[in-house]
Amino acid sequence: MARIKLTLAYLGTGFSGWQIQAPNQGKEARTVQGVLEDAVARLCGQPVRLHGSGRTDAGVHADGQIAHFDTPAGTPAINWRAALNSSLPPDLSVLLAEEAGEDFHARFSAKEKIYTYCLWLERAFIPPKLRDRVWACGPLGPQGLAGMDAAAALLIGEHDFAGFQNRGTDPADTRRTLHEISRFYPALPGENLPDPEGRYLAWRFRANGFLKQMVRNLAGFLVAVGQGRLTPEDARRALGSAGRAGLDFPTAPARGLSLTGVIYQGKAD
């Protein structure tokens, strides 16, 4: 028996999230875990359970999701990356497959996670290749990037992020340490340069853990600040509040979010 660690990329548009779900009215939801488990089971000749580093919601993408599974006894040596990619659909790929120690666990061994949220600062036109990967939130207002930067600086550190979580889970502790919030301009798909008008903007979030839809709420808050509907100082009101402290900011759409990487023992996979 061997423990196999997978690094995965997927376009979340066609998936109902990572986790296998109970059938609804007799119909099974298409999930990343379910599609992967079916592919591994075909190679092993029996069902195999996969464990992911975390759950991604419906529509959320990944460029560095981590999962692991244990091969059944007697499974022959397999080039797992090639074998799985030959049968997986085009919206899901294995970037790397490697053997891990028996003490490795995709979820419980993780020290930090990195998410990226992508914005398109226009509404009338979205490049077709970006349509499923960005939130077309529209242009920024007077506070613009300076306001967003100021708000991000107040959010970094160890805080109670209860005001930035959505209902659906009840964690015992809502304190998390947000190590980094930084912005950058990604290259446009098929090109080596960012959008010359600065419309394609991304934010990187790195923390020791995230609450339910926390990154999407942080992104929604930053956009509200950048558009002048909130002030950077409103970050102090939202932190530690049971709700949103009366602040009007949206949960950003799932399509702009990607799980970029998971950090184990000081390195991102």
Image (tube, rainbow, N blue to C red):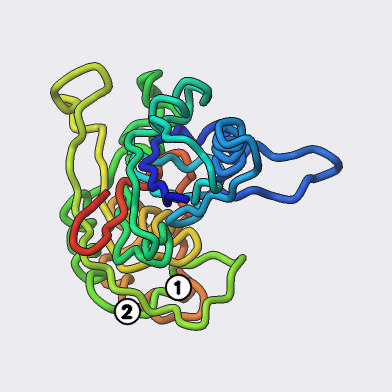
Locate residue 233 relative to residue 163 in the image: left or right: left
Q: Which mark is residue 17?
A: none
Which residue is pictured at 65% across the width and 43% down the height?
47
Tell me the crowding category of disc 2: few under 14, some 14 to 19, or many 20 or more residues within 10 angstroms, Cα based. Answer: some
Q: Where is residue 70 in the image (x, y as percent from the top left)?
A: 49, 51
Residue on which disc 2 sits? 159
Q: Can residue 228 be seen in this view?
A: no
Locate residue 56 relative to residue 161 in the image: left or right: right
Residue on which disc 1 sits? 163
Which residue is pictured at 47% across the width and 29% down the height?
84
Choose between 213 and 84: the one closer to the eye. 84
Element type at mark 2: strand
Which residue is pictured at 34% across the width and 63% down the height?
110
Tell me the crowding category of disc 1: few under 14, some 14 to 19, or many 20 or more residues within 10 angstroms, Cα based. Answer: many
Choose between 119 and 146: the one closer to the eye. 119
Q: In this view, does 260 lie above or below 104?
A: above
At label 2, which amino acid type do we have?
A: His
Residue 222's quadrant in the figure? bottom left
